[in-house]
Amino acid sequence: MNSLLPYLAEHWARHRLTGARRPMLAGLKLTHRCNLRCRTCPFWRRPRGDLSFGAMQTALGELYHAGCRILVLEGGEPFLWRDGKRGLEDVIAAARGCGFMRVGVTTNGTFPLATSADIVWVSLDGLQASHEANRGPVWDTVMANLTASTHPRHFAQVTITRENWREVPELVRFLAGRVAGVTIQFFYPFAESEDLWLPWAERRQVLQELIALKAAGYPVINSYRVLRALADNSWRCHDWLIADAEPGEDDASPAVIHYGCYLKGRAEIDCRRCGFSAHAELSLAYDLCPGALLTGQRVFNLLSPTR
């Protein structure tokens, strides 16, 4: 089968020639339920029913028809999702059957990382004390699951806050050799979560340290261009490249789908406080920034055949 790259090239050319704005990457929250109560997360505080398998299939069809070919399954905790006997692997199979060319999963890492997803992101918030200050006493479980995992593309996803920023460089050094790479983003202050937004001076300091670690060969996946751009949010954001879906009010509701910024329908949008590095990478890759394109290849394996 073809690699993802021809589709991305066609998608880019269509936009340049006709101005068509179609999303390319979708996040699908299967559930707001989670086994943890992270201080930084608003979604476990927003009780909703899980998506039914049928509602999930309908959402996949709409997202695919809109243009998305990369899907990231989220929560809550996606490994908790069930509809009868169906679980996360059934969702991954349905996504591939629908035509999605890459399927990723974001998880808190407290469940074994046994999945057929193409990419797995495990959320880490610092070394043990900082991680557990946000998530509870789960560090040893997460580390054991990372050690036991044979998945070839498991990444650490680090959300940087005013409480953990000082030890992020040490965390990157610790994770070298334990994960395929480390991606970062900055905490955004949702209304329900604690205000752990990192001020600009501290943000710039940690970004400089991450740039130095990347130059020294540590597994920081984010591109130099994005690490520099996050210092003042200086990239041109193409938010129309993304879409998001999540459960409705109850188990019988269809998915709620938003096109554009991740915050649409979820929080007040304040671009000045944005720290969503994935959005920056995608936008800059679409503007043909070499470093962002390389990051896309390292994470999504754009050149390899699809399954």
Image (tube, rainbow, N blue to C red):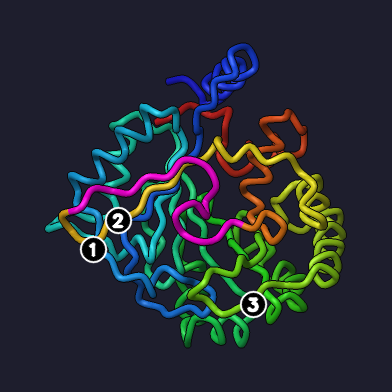
Locate the N terminus and report the quarter of the image it occupies: top left
Q: For mark 3, give the secondary structure.
A: loop
Please name the amino acid that badge 3 sits on. Answer: Leu
- As drawn, 242 above or below 182: above
Q: Residue 260: say if magenta.
A: yes
Q: State yes or no: discs 3 and 2 in contact (Cβ < 8 Å).
A: no
Tell me where the magenta segment starts and ends, as one range: 253-269
Earlier-in-chain disc, 3 versus 2:
3
Please name the amino acid that badge 2 sits on. Answer: Pro
Q: Disc 3 and disc 2: Cα gap in Å? A: 26 Å
Earlier-in-chain disc, 1 versus 3:
1
Disc 1: which residue: 49
Disc 3: which residue: 196
Instruction: Find residue 247 and name its label.
Output: 2
Residue 183 visible in the shown view: no
Front-most of residues 220 and 248: 248
- As drawn, 223 above or below 179: above
The residue shown at (35%, 76%) is 35
Residue 213 visible in the shown view: yes
Q: For mark 1, give the secondary structure.
A: loop
Q: Residue 62: say if magenta.
A: no
